[in-house]
Amino acid sequence: MWTTFPATRTTMFWFASLVTCLAVIGCEPRKQDPPTESPAAAPATETPAAPALTDAAIAHIAVTANAIDSTMGELAKTKASSSAVKDFAKTMVTDHGAVNKQAVQLAQRLKVTPEDNDVSRQLQQGADEAHASLASKSGAEFDQAYMQREVEYHQAVLDALDQALIPGAQNAELKGLLQSVRPAFVAHLERAKQVQGKLGSA
């Protein structure tokens, strides 16, 4: 078990944005019970499904998600007070930077230009707010807030990979890249929890 630190308003806004993104990018809608018949009720109309993402859009989301965590890692390298947090941040910069290089190289080989979209823009907006909030903190407060965010971030990205990005990718190589990097996100999540737990017991 690890200690859960109080989430900041900005952290929760960011996390809610990513959850919203999952809904936008085509997760299966929940089946609802048929409405009870009522003579006065207006005819029910189905809500149109969200348009499926193209491979170019999925590639942009993947690049954006990795770039975001690299940027957060760079911030943590300079502001963190715990050596464990600094080491974690260095790993995030290295690993996510390497994944983005692979993604860019694949896109170039496939002659696909990553396409900006509502999901990647929401991700970036939430990340910008989280970055500003983290930048205002220091010492143990920064360490706790950064690791709280990293746990939430990696879980949310794993959910996005499993529920939308991997199932939605049409190109076999793009799908393969997303599948190949998934274990790294799992490992990052477990390590983030471990570091967070050590901060809570310090």
Image: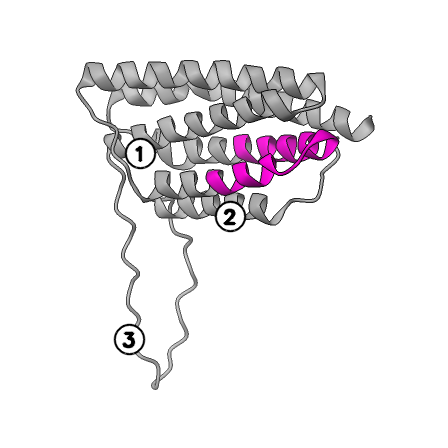
Q: Main secondary structure of the magenta part?
A: helix
Q: Position of residue 37 (x, y in %)?
A: 37, 78
Q: Which residues are magenta?
A: 128-154
Give the residue displayed 70% in from the left and 16% down from the top. 83
In front: 4, or 80? 80
Q: Position of residue 78 (x, y in %)?
A: 60, 22
Work out whether 83 lies above or below 142: above
Identify the amino acid type marked 3. Answer: Pro
Q: Name the residue beneath numbered marker 1.
A: 168
Give the residue displayed 24% in from the left and 20% down from the top. 107
Q: How many marks?
A: 3
In front: 147, or 159? 147
Q: Element under label 2?
A: helix
Identify the amino acid type marked 2. Answer: Ala
In front: 11, or 36? 11
Kindly report which numbered mark, 2 or 3, lies closer to the viewer in this rendering: 2
Q: Element under label 1?
A: helix
Q: Which sits earlier in the primary sequence, circle 1 or circle 3?
A: 3
Q: Name the residue beneath numbered marker 3.
A: 43
Work out whether 174 lies above or below 119: above
Counting other residues with Cα less than 10 Å from the Cα at mark 2, is it few (<14), some (14-19), or many (20 or more)? some
Q: Position of residue 189 (x, y in %)?
A: 58, 25
Quadrant holding the N terminus: top right
Work out whether 16 lies above or below 160: below
In the picture, the disc for residue 16 is: 2
Quadrant holding the C terminus: top right
The alpha-carbon separation of the residues under discs 2 and 1 comes to: 21 Å
Q: Is residue 121 magenta?
A: no
Q: Element under label 3?
A: loop
Q: Is residue 144 magenta?
A: yes
The alpha-carbon separation of the residues under discs 1 and 3 comes to: 32 Å
